[in-house]
Image (tube, rainbow, N blue to C red):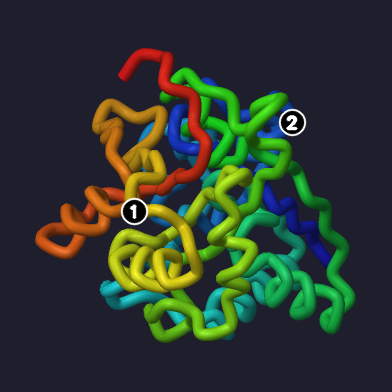
Amino acid sequence: MTGFVSFVGSGPGDPDLMTVKAVKRLKAAQAVLFDDLSAGPILEYAGPEADLVGVGKRAGRPSPKQNHVSKLLVEYAQSGANVVRLKSGDSGLFGRLEEELVALKEAGIPYEIIPGVPSAIAAAAAIGIPLTRRLTARRVQFVTGHDVKGELPSDLNMAALADAEATTVVFMGKRTFPLLVDALHRHGLSLSTPAIMAESVSTPDQSIVRSTIGGLASRLADEIGSNPALILYGPLAEFGDD
């Protein structure tokens, strides 16, 4: 008897931002394997008999190995369970979705992917700005701020990231942002380029910091804090509420 795995994007943290289909799958699941950022009130949608298993990864903290997470998914599904793999934001954005899909395919386990509100989209909404601007930001690019070792990736396309006419969103980049800014400046991007750091988007701990890439790099060189954050920079709109 083989079960079924639903990869569910939980959105940025506010349970009201989850899709109707995501809530239905959580309510019907016998097992929920969840990321740290998908915990809290979001798990209240799960049924009272469901196994809730935390498998989240956070930079600088002890975390389950990816092969262990994939093994758990396979084992729960092979027992005949309906499994929800709950990932923050959208599971296809820097969520290690591919490794888990490969494990399920190799085991012959059926699955589905339910999209969630990406944290970058939720951050722009919380800030009150558009990610694109008709005359000055026709392109949006998403990039991860660290590699598997927690360091600034060495293979980033700096020419693209230093494009002053693109809106760039950096995921998981607080620790490495000063190094990134140094590289961006060497590739011609002004240190006065507008930047916004959005922490704990859509939750009660939400914080929005408006600055420049230079100012934000200086701030993060002194203190990064523990809250999850996105960093946006480029030709950002200057209106909106904090």
Circle number at residue 191 = 1
Residue receiving disc 2 = 21
Image side of residue 86 versus residue 196, left or right = right
For the C terminus, the quadrant is top left
87 w.r.t. 47: above or below: below
Percent across and percent down for residue 192 are 34, 46
Percent across and percent down for residue 136 are 64, 32
Residue visible at 26% across and 50% down in the picture: 216
**In terms of sequence position, does the residue under pointer 1 or pointer 2 come before the other?**
2
Circle number at residue 203 = none
Inter-mark Cα distance, 1 to 2? 43 Å
Q: Can residue 225 be seen in this view?
A: no
Q: Is residue 86 visible?
A: yes
| Callout 1 crowding tier (Cα within 10 Å): few <14, some 14–19, many ≥20 | some
| Callout 2 crowding tier (Cα within 10 Å): few <14, some 14–19, many ≥20 | few
The disc labelled 2 sits on which kind of residue?
Answer: Lys
The disc labelled 1 sits on which kind of residue?
Answer: Leu
The secondary element bearing badge 2 is classed as: helix
Image side of residue 236 versus residue 193, left or right = right
Residue 55, quarter of the rendered image: bottom left
Percent across and percent down for residue 158 are 56, 71
For the N terminus, the quadrant is bottom right
Image side of residue 27 versus residue 215, left or right = right
Residue visible at 36% across and 48% down in the picture: 229
Residue 19, quarter of the rendered image: top right
Taking depth in this image into account, of 101 and 191 the one nearest to the observer is 191
The secondary element bearing badge 1 is classed as: loop
Percent across and percent down for residue 39 are 40, 45
Residue visible at 57% across and 75% down in the picture: 156
71 w.r.t. 81: above or below: below
Taking depth in this image into account, of 223 and 55 the one nearest to the observer is 223
Q: Which one is in front in this view, the residue at disc 1 or the one at disc 2? A: 1
